[in-house]
Image: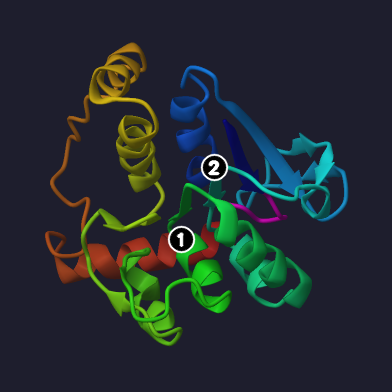
Amino acid sequence: MDIVIPLFDRFEPLDAIGPYEILGYVPGATVRFVTAEPGLVQDVLGSLPVQVPTRYSEVERCDVLLIPGGGSFLTMVDDPDFLGWVRRMHTGTRFTTSVCTGSLVLGAAGVLEGLTATTHWDAAADLESYGAVYTSERVVRQDRVITSAGVSSGIDMAIQLTALLTDEPTAQAIQLYTEYDPQPPFDTGSVAKAPAEIVELALALGRAATA
């Protein structure tokens, strides 16, 4: 089982590493990162370079395609060759998936036209500009297309994907092994719950950190 995660400069770390942590335990699965040219790929926060050895153009098919978000989505949506590759991969995947603004890449590739999908709450309008119907649900499955909301939701998506690729006991066991049992100290994890001043602060902090 071949699971492929494209990484470009300014990727959001947890978008990629969260699902990688879960899917790496799937029996019989190989998770690999690909990029435009082999070498170091830098995350959006600036301190987590990843050595990626494989060009995406070398991959002809995969079972799962997982597109992470972050500032890297801007590079991906502006690259016709990469979008063409995404479309080709999608024709043969068991599941095509995204985390956060990675869904905008799927949208730009034409994968989400007419589908209900999710993304980071600050990118809802951008998602709909690609013909998708935005929903604030944390994980959305439309047949073999699965999108997840902002950053941490990729872990939820990966656990659900694991159940689809294997079975529920395996997914539950991986969830237990990684001790994924969220108990956040504050109830402001979605824009629907957070006061207006927290929403504004979140936007300011996010933009400052990724400038």
The quadrant holding residue 165 is: top left
Q: 157 or 161, which is in the foreground? A: 161
Provide the secondary structure element on which disc 1 rests.
Answer: helix
Q: 93 or 192, which is in the foreground? A: 93
Q: Which residue position holds label 2?
A: 16
Which amino acid type is marked by label 2? Ala
Q: Which residues are magenta?
A: 7-11
Which amino acid type is marked by label 1? Gly
Q: 38 or 11, which is in the foreground? A: 38
Q: Is residue 211 visible?
A: no
Vertically, is 167 above or below 88? above
Residue 8 on the magenta span: yes
- Please give the name of the residue rendered at 62% of the width and 53% of the height, measured from the top-left corner: 11
Measuring from the top left, give residue 184's x and y in whole percent: 20, 35
Vertically, is 154 above or below 135? above
Measuring from the top left, give residue 137's x and y in whole percent: 21, 59
Measuring from the top left, give residue 70's x and y in whole percent: 55, 59
Q: Which residue position holds label 1?
A: 206
- Please give the name of the residue rendered at 22% of the width and 65% of the height, measured from the top-left corner: 136
